[in-house]
Structure formats: C-alpha cells, structure tokens
Amino acid sequence: MSELEYRENLKELVDGLNFKEKVERAERLIREAYEIHGAGLVVANSLGKDSLCVWDLAKRVAPEIRGFIVTTRYKPEETVRFMNEIVARHPELRVFKNDMDIPDRLYETDPDLCCDLLKVRPTRQAIEEMKITCWITGLRCTEGRTRTDFQEIEERDIGLVKLNPILIWKEREIWQYLALNSVKVNPLYAQGYRSLGCAPCTRISNEDDERAGRWVGTSKCGGECGIHTRPLKIFSEGGGI
Ligand code: SF4
C-alpha cells in the first residue's frame, strides 16, 4: 500500500465510481493497511454516520480491529446514550475524555482553545496509549469547504499514517451503506441534524454544506475541531486527562 498508488483525481473518483466500487475500494484500503499495521491500526469513531460506516467496514475486514471515541462534557445526552450502547456492544472501543477545569463557556470565547483541550488532547492521548501507527477516519471530501484537500492515505505526523477509506463517498452513499447493512445511528439524525458535535456548537442546517451547522456564529463556522489539522504526535503530559 503506497500513498502514491492512491493519489488519484478524487473528483473523478467521487463521480466516476459506483456505490459497490466505493465499498470494495474502502475495504481494500482497510485490508491493506491492516496487513501492514496489524494491531496498530485503529478506527477513530466519532459516533457520527461516517464513523459508523468505517467502523462497520473495518469490522468486516477484521472483527478484532480496535477503536477509540473522544467525548466531551458538552456532548448531547442522545449522543452519550448512543455511545454507552455501542461501547457495551464493543468493549474494544476505548473512550477518551479531558475532565480538566476550563473557563465557563470557553466554546463561546475561544472555541479553538476549547476544541484543542477537549478534542485534540484526548486524541493525542489515544494515539499514544493505544500505540496507534495508522488511524482510520470517516473524513469525506464532499462534506464541506474544509475537507477538499485530503488524500485517502496521508502521513501528516511522522510515524502516524492516516487512512481515509471513504474519502470519495457522497452523503447519499453513506446513508445507502448504513441502510443496506442495518447499522444503527444516533437518534439525533431523525431530528434533522446532518453533522453531529457538541451541543453548544451544533445546529440543524439545510445548507448544501453538510457541516454548515457546526460552530455557527463563530470564525470556525463549518470548520474543524483540529484533530484533522493539528499535529497529533506531540503528547502533552499536562491537562489532567
Ligand atoms: S465543539 Fe464546541 S463545546 Fe465541543 S470542544 Fe469544540 S468548542 Fe468546545
């Protein structure tokens, strides 16, 4: 499996491959990565629809593949319940959370710092503690303005490969996969949410951009929490996580 081999024109793949071909490509990417990384291959499961898709795909490749969830004190109660249910079914999913004291309503005054403390730090902790050499994400290049420049295989941090096996899938194909495979999803989707995050920073949005409901009214609107843009191999001892 080489990064160069998979550096194709993503736009052509998004529109050119059919659903079955995309599923087969995603499974092939995961299988090849598992052959190389073994137990070092771990799924980052955000509990959103895209993560559930890659989690299900990974389990088809090898049921023993592990995963991690990063949660925060601000997750909606529906998401917490959903998380507890899935962890009960899959004890190989570890949960990471930063419980350190932070200023009240930091998500309003400095959402970048809030995300850095509550999301990026626990992700670094997961990578360190689980000895991850390759992490699988549910990133898709059609999700929003900040997600167009990723590749299916990346190595942004030296020694940490990032695999984005459903990068070329459309929103419709995610729902197609979940429906065809009877994968249970967070009940918040039934209320109209299309992208799920922390309660204070997530709204229902009807805009074309799937992530338009995230961080509405801030400079981060429709943007990123940082786990896909910040270095992950710098492990901080501080922070109480
Ligand atoms: S999504 Fe909002 S509440 Fe959650 S960590 Fe980021 S800024 Fe804080």
Image: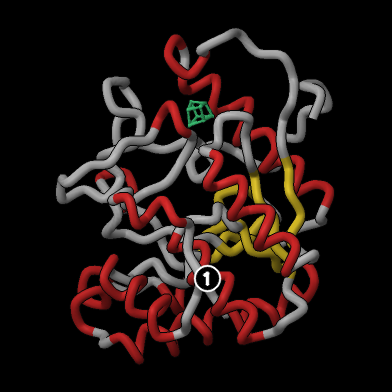
Q: Is residue 146 above or below residue 111?
A: below
Residue lying at 75% horizontally and 62% vertically, measured from the top left: 88
Task: Quadrant for the N terminus, please.
Answer: bottom right
Q: Which residue is mark 1?
A: 54
Quarter of the image for residue 124 reads top right
Query: Which three-letter amino acid code belongs to the residue tagged 1?
Result: Val
**x%, y% of residue 179?**
38, 79
The vertical placement of 89 against 76, above or below, is below
Identify the coloring.
secondary structure
Q: Nearer the viewer, residue 57 or 135?
A: 57
Drawn side of residue 136 relative to residue 14, left or right:
right
In the image, 160: left or right of 76? right
Q: Residues within 10 Å of mark 1 (few under 14, many from 20)?
A: many
Residue displayed at 27% across by 77% down = 13
Q: Position of residue 69 (x, y in %)?
A: 66, 51
- Residue 217, by quadrant, is top left
* Residue 83 in view, yes or no: yes
Find numbered disc 1 in the image and state the secondary structure of the residue it sits on: helix
Residue sitting at 30 percent across and 30 percent down? 221
Q: Quadrant of the C terminus?
A: top right
The reply, left or right, for residue 105 in relation to residue 166 is right
Q: Residue 48: x, y in percent? A: 47, 56
Count of numbered circles in the view: 1
Question: Would residue 22 be found to the left or right of residue 100 on screen?
Answer: left
Taking depth in this image into account, of 182 and 44 the one nearest to the observer is: 182
